[in-house]
């Protein structure tokens, strides 16, 4: 496995690359490069995203341009991920062949709130890179138990952290420190 040299983060459906969690990760992991990106639909002023499959090409473009900018030869040296929808898009991209060194999935939307039967895991069996899932223990998009029963679908090492409280946006000072520390420690295990 290649040593991680950067982490690309994409925001949730209605979020931005300036999300408090992303800024804190960038600050706490410095000098490790954190590339915060926006999806094109947000740059165009649209509030809501198109369907996930239409964004896979954009993830590949972001990966390629980020590698070029940082002079990183191997895509396996770049971690890919994001918050909620952004993480979901990245996980689908990897399941469809995007090469990355691992996935960092913050508040992954396992299912819509109140609809646990509508799992967003159909692509999990095709994920073949180490994954770090970080969510709160009371996220309406997926409980720790629901996640645990679906991690077995992924054919790669899965590490998880469930923060105490915070709903779908765990962003207290202690949450942000735990998130940054978990990412930092996890990246060390990938070297």
Image (cartoon, rainbow, N blue to C red):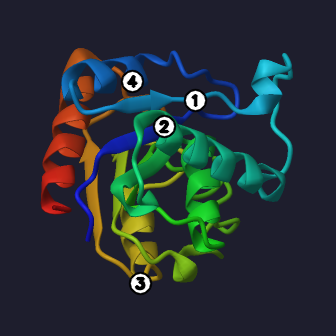
Determine the secondary structure under disc 4.
Answer: helix
Q: Position of residue 60 (x, y in %)?
A: 65, 53
- Could you tell me how far apart the alpha carbons at marks 3 and 4 are, in whole angstroms? 28 Å
Residue neighbourhood size for the residue with mark 2, other residues' Cα within 10 Å, grouped as few (<14), some (14–19), many (≥20):
many
Q: Position of residue 2 (x, y in %)?
A: 27, 64
Image marks 4 and 1: residues in contact by CB distance under 8 Å: no
Residue identifier under label 3: 155
Q: Is residue 75 above or below residue 5?
A: below
- Could you tell me how far apart the alpha carbons at marks 4 and 1 are, in whole angstroms? 13 Å
Q: Is residue 127 left or right of residue 189?
A: right
Q: Which mark is residue 37?
A: 1
- Could you tell me how far apart the alpha carbons at marks 4 and 2 are, in whole angstroms? 10 Å
In terms of sequence position, does the residue under pointer 1 or pointer 2 come before the other?
A: 2
> What residue is rendered at 25% in x and 28% in y?
175
Q: Is residue 22 above or below residue 190?
A: above
Residue neighbourhood size for the residue with mark 3, other residues' Cα within 10 Å, grouped as few (<14), some (14–19), many (≥20):
some
Residue identifier under label 4: 21
Determine the secondary structure under disc 1.
Answer: loop
Residue identifier under label 2: 9
Q: Disc 1 or disc 3, which is closer to the eye?
A: 1
Give the quarter of the figure containing the C terminus: bottom left
Q: Is residue 88 left or right of residue 178?
A: right
- Could you tell me how far apart the alpha carbons at marks 1 and 3 are, in whole angstroms? 27 Å
Q: How many marks?
A: 4
> What residue is rendered at 65% in x and 76% in y?
122
Residue 129, quarter of the rendered image: bottom left
Name the foreground residue: 119 vs 67: 67
């Amino acid at each position: 496995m290649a040593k991680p040299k950067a982490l690309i983060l994409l925001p949730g459906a209605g979020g931005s690359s300036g999300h408090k969690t992303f800024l804190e990760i960038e600050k706490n992991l410095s000098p490790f490069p954190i590339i915060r990106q926006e999806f094109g639909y947000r740059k165009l002023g649209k509030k809501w995203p198109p369907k996930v499959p239409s964004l896979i090409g954009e993830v590949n473009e972001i990966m390629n341009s980020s590698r070029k900018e940082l002079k990183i030869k191997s895509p396996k040296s770049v971690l890919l991920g994001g918050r909620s929808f952004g993480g979901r898009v990245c996980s689908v991209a990897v399941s469809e062949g995007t090469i990355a060194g691992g996935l960092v999935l913050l508040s992954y939307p396992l299912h819509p709130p109140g609809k646990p039967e509508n799992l967003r895991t159909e692509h999990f069996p095709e994920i073949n890179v180490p994954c770090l899932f970080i969510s709160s223990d009371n996220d309406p998009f997926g409980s720790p138990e629901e996640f645990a029963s679906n991690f077995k679908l992924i054919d790669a090492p899965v590490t998880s952290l469930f923060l105490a409280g915070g709903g779908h946006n765990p962003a207290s000072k202690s949450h942000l420190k735990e998130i940054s520390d978990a990412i930092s420690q996890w990246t060390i295990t990938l070297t």
